[in-house]
Amino acid sequence: YGDILSLSSDVDDTKKTEKRVSRIAATENGISTSSVRNPSRFSPPWSYLTETSDANVAFNSLVAAVKDVDPNVKIEEETRSDGFYYLHATVPTSVPPGITGSAGLDDLEFIVRPDDSVVLYRSASRTSVFVYPLTQPVSDRNTNLKRLDKIRRKLGWLMLGDEQQGSSIL
């Protein structure tokens, strides 16, 4: 799965570290709030303020919604420490069919940021299938995007930007 990236900045001589999820490469199927340079793999962050202003309450709701999105979802990591909320879950990939084992999983990652009431996320297939001579992976039929959208709609959270439409190529 992706790396949690730390961005450090000095503002008024105060060191501040922000965490974010990693991007999705052009050779991967998935969607991420960090893929700003690749519009087809980018989706804007969510705000949980439609439900609560408490990050812990929002994180609890997120964990429940992720568990409910698919009967085969497995929570791999759940971290709550010093204002850092991180969730990593896996779910068997549905497209393309037939991939088994750890290669046949999609990773879902979320960071809840209490400072600005924002949720960053990443959903990516561990395996991408290529058909010669294509240089882009065969479409996952937007399964990662649809799964994330299902979670957000269940929570009633706001998307902070234009909704990603995904690929129209099957």
Image (tube, rainbow, N blue to C red):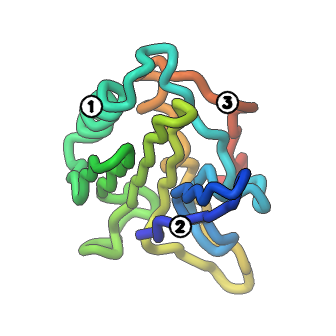
Describe the element under mark 1 as helix, strand or loop.
helix
Marks 3/2: CA–CA distance: 21 Å
Q: Are marks 1 and 3 in contact (CB under 8 Å)?
A: no
Q: Quadrant of residue 64?
A: top left
Task: Give neighbour class at mark 2: few <14, some 14-19, many 20+ (Cα, 10 Å).
Answer: some
Q: Residue at x 53, y 75 (%)?
A: 129
Left or right: 134 in relation to 33: right
Q: For marks 3 and 2, give the one nearer the viewer.
A: 2
Q: Quadrant of residue 17?
A: bottom right
Describe the element under mark 3 as helix, strand or loop.
loop
Query: x, y percentage for residue 170?
Result: 64, 53
Q: Nearer the viewer, residue 58 or 96?
A: 58
Query: x, y percentage for residue 162?
Result: 75, 32
Pick whichever of labels 3 and 2 is earlier in the sequence: 2
Q: Is residue 65 visible?
A: no
Q: Nearer the viewer, residue 71 or 21?
A: 21
Q: Is residue 80 above or below residue 49?
A: below
Determine which residue is flagged by label 3: 160
Determine which residue is flagged by label 1: 60
Marks 1/3: CA–CA distance: 21 Å
- Which residue is at the far bottom? 132
Q: Nearer the viewer, residue 130 or 108?
A: 108
Q: What's the amino acid at mark 1?
A: Asn
Q: Residue at x 64, y 74 (%)?
A: 27
Q: What's the amino acid at mark 3?
A: Leu
Q: Residue at x 47, y 70 (%)?
A: 3
Task: Give neighbour class at mark 3: few <14, some 14-19, many 20+ (Cα, 10 Å).
Answer: few
Q: Is residue 88 above or below residue 101?
A: above
In the drawing, what numbered circle is on residue 5?
A: 2
